[in-house]
Each structure stands twice: as structure tokens, then as C-alpha cells.
Amino acid sequence: MRIVRVRVFEAASCGGLLDGLDIELIRPRTGGENAHFVPICLLGKNGTGKSQFLQIIAEIFQAAWHEHRPEEEAAAANPELLFEIIYEMDLQGEGVRRVKLSRTREPSGRIGKMLMEIKRDDGYRPLADNQQSEFGQHLPPLVVAYTSGDNETLSVPFYVSRSGYAASVAAAAMKDANAIVPDNRLVLLDYSTHLEVLIANLMIGPDDLRSDLVRHAGLASLHSFRLVIQLNHPDAPKIRGKNLTRKGVQLTDELEQYINRLCNAATCWDYDPRQEVYTLDYLVDAESRRAFSAFWSDTVELYRSLHKLAMLNDLMIPKKARERLRRNIKIRKFASKLPEPQDETKVFKIEEVRFQKTRHSGTPSDVDYVSLSDGEHQQAQLFGIVAMLRDRNTLFLLDEPESHFNPLWRAKLITRLMELPVQGLGEQEFILTTHAPFVPSDMRREQVRIFAKEDEKLSARRPEIETFGATYDSILSHCFDIDPPISQLAQEKINSLKTTASAEEIEQEMPRIGSSVEKALLADRLFELKNQK
């Protein structure tokens, strides 16, 4: 998949910030170092609409899936969004097709029906029925968002998707426990899901991937972990469903099956029937991995099983808080999120995750996962997400995916992604945002868009310079208007020395100033003052 152009007529959100936005994202399909994997990087200062742009893209495809298969996306976060998006789909056996998806206002003023048009030899042809299978074949099968912080703007459509899925599961548990609720098409991965991603990849991922995901932290392998599932504690809803053996949280047959599988794959486990608490321990070795592989066909299936159990934690959030979030989303107020339940009240949790690390002496030792840094957590999750979700035409929306990385890891982000032992990166679309110059230095200027805001209107443009291989100073200067590329306090100090200080004062301060063009200019000033004597 590759997005070509996005036009926003009326965003119905973000205070009108994106209204009228027209962005082209055309990139060459052949030539260059990134001939197959050609992500888009959005640069810009805070408040220039990068995250809102990702949100709009997610809302477009959520609305399309809701119209096509409402059982898979139960609601649309932004039903009043008016847009036109042009993108290309890489259909297996049929080549690349260009698609135009739009929704506009009718002459009467009403919001019109969503229209999909497929480009043929004689131009675009509209599909007559949005329920026909061809409509779904020309949509990304998954829209995957990753956010590294508390950016609730991007999260909104994904909360709506999650809420719709949870409501369907709750209804099934009460009325028809053997019903299978279809997986939703929007997937949000943030810090709250990182352990689910990690366990899925490290239990049944291929050998080379498992080692690749943890080697950045100097770890050898996953050693052990614990799962706790508590269904009948005091905070559980007091509602009885079809399964009369459950006293607390009511489960569908699908969720009951996941618990049975996890018990069967455990090294050892305990069950407290009074509190309905399962405590499952896993010592990770070849046999435990073989057991997991017998119950789950791939990492995505295992991840979804763990994540669906983790979604039961929403039941522990007070009803008033859930209703508040729904109201805020409805009135387009996004500065709120669901509170995280306390660990002791969670229905499902992953605990005591430990890794094996080989010391310089050659002796192995155990390392607790919580002792690793945020950057190490983030890197394992980010690469785990990309390695796990391999469906052709998947759309990845990555909001500041390297925010916790050190500068060296930031500089290697694109290289590390390309070196992952997976196939098909070029068949997927990646759009990421950043505030740093490291990532764009690994991308051609055709892959970079600079976002700016002036008079409350957004714009996006290509850089004037070639970003691939450019120095970070050049990118900071041309893309962020930081010139010279040093901090404000240091700049003011150097300017003061140049304009008011004596030669002796400058000479005294020179050893305390780091290397830069500005220091060289200060040295010129020192030379000038000495020559005046």
C-alpha cells in the first residue's frame, strides 16, 4: 500500500485546523537505496498537526470499514469527516491498483455517501455497492497505530474501535457465549500493550527474530514469565451470564478457550475456585515454545488472545469514567483518556517477566524486564509490532516511534527496520512523525514532509535540500529553522562575548565553549581584538 494524496475538506475535529489541507505523498517506486521500503516521515514543530493528520487517516479507513463491515468496526469516530484520499493497493496476482476514496457534502448540505473509485485504463470507475467484496479488497486490512506517550489525539478512533469490540463481547457473554466476535480492523499499540507484543514474539516467533528483538539490550533470551487472571474479585461486575459456573466476570466461549490453552501450555499453574484466580507460570524453553505453537498458529493469533483478555481490565474502570470518555469523544474533546486500573484490580496481567543475560565471564544471569530502560522497552515493542503484523497492505501510523531512543538508536532506526528478518516491508505503508533530524537523514527528500502552521492553517511541503545523507545541522536549519544549531542560552552567551567582552574575557571563556561554527566566529572576533592592540 502507498498513500498518494490526502485532501481534507472538513475535518469536523481539531478546531478546523486541518480543514482545506491538501497533501501529496508521492514517492518513486523504483531506484534508490530504499527501493521497496519507502516510508513517509512527517517533520515539524509541536502543534503543527502531524498527529492530527495521522488521526484523520485512521478515521477515514475506520469509517470505510464501518460502512463495509459494521460487525468488524462497530462505530466511526468521525462520521462528519469530508475528504478525498488517493492510494495504491498491491493486490497479489493483480498488480498495483490506484484507488480514490471520498466523502463530500451533497448540494442539499447533507453529508453524502462514501464513494470508492478504482482507476482503470479509461479513468476512475465507481463501485456501485459499498457492501460488495471488492470494496473491502481495496481497503488496508489493518490500520496499526503506535504512540509512545499520552497523545490522545491519535488514540481517539482506536478507543472507539476498542469500545465497539468490547460492547460486542459483553453482549455475547450475556446472551450467546458461543458467538465469535470478529476482530476489529484498527489496532492501537502503546506502552500498555508492550508485554503482550513481547510475549507473542518471543514465544512463537522465528529464532532469528527472537534474538534480534532483545540483542539491543544485551539480552540472550526470554527466561520466564507469569500470567494472572482473576475473574471474581470484589470490583468485578455482579452480572450473571449464560455460563452459570462463573460468579464474576462473564466470558465468551472464545475467551474461555484462550484461558484453557494458556493453562495447558503453562509449566505449572494454580486455580483458586473461590476467587476464580488463575496463576500460570512459564519457564521458557524449547518444550514450552512447542506447546504454544501447538495452540496458536502465529504471533498475531497469540497476541490477539492475550490482548482480548487484557481488554477485560476495562471492566474495572468505573462506569462514570467510561461514560465520560464516550461523551468527550462525541463532542470531539480529546484531552482525556480512560484511567489505568490498579494492578491489584486487573482481570488480566503479565508479571515477573525475566530474561537471560550472558555475562562477560560466560555465566548466565537473570534480568528483570522492569529494570530495562524505557528506550529498551520501546525498541523491543516497535520492532516487534512490525515483525508481527505482516499482512500485505497494512497501514502503520507511528507517532514519534523513537522518542525514548538515545541518539545512536535514533540514527539507526530505518536501518534496523530494514534489517528485521521479515519479508514484505515494501508491500505495507509506513507514516511516522518525529521532532528529531536523525530519521530524515536516512530518507530521500521525496519521503519527507515538513508541517507548518501559520494563521491557524496547516501546510506541508517537501524539504528544499536533499535530506538523505544530510548532516543533522543542515536538517535542523532547513526543516526546523534552527540556525545556528546550538541552544538559545549558549547562543546568547556567545553573542554577548562577541559584542561586549574584551580579548582577555573571550580568551578566558573559550575553553568552556564547545566546538561549533559560532565558536569559530568568536575566535575570529578574538583575533580581531588582539590585532587592534
Image (spheres, rainbow, N blue to C red):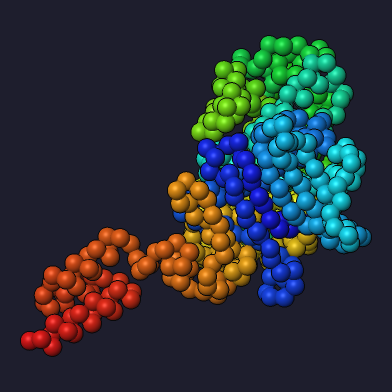
Instruction: Write the residue at 56% across / 54% down.
Output: 433
Instruction: Residue at the far front: name it.
Output: 107
Left or right: 309 in relation to 290: left
Give the image location of residue 434, x and y in percent.
53, 56
Give the image location of residue 127, x and y in percent.
87, 45
Front-most of residues 528 and 263: 528
Front-most of residues 175 and 260: 175
Instruction: Residue at the far left: name it.
Output: 533
Give the image location of residue 292, x and y in percent.
80, 44
Instruction: Write the residue at 85% across / 58% down.
Output: 123
* Residue 167: quadrant of the picture: top right
Residue 404, visible in the rendered structure: no
527 versus 9 height, above or below: below
Left or right: 395 in relation to 518: right
Front-most of residues 120 and 45: 120
Instruction: Write the residue at 74% across / 61% down.
Output: 425
* Residue 359: quadrant of the picture: bottom right
Residue 239, visible in the rendered structure: yes
* Residue 445: quadrant of the picture: bottom right
Instruction: Write the residue at 72% across / 31% down.
Output: 108
Front-most of residues 253 and 524: 524
Quarter of the image with the C terminus is: bottom left
423 versus 107 height, above or below: below
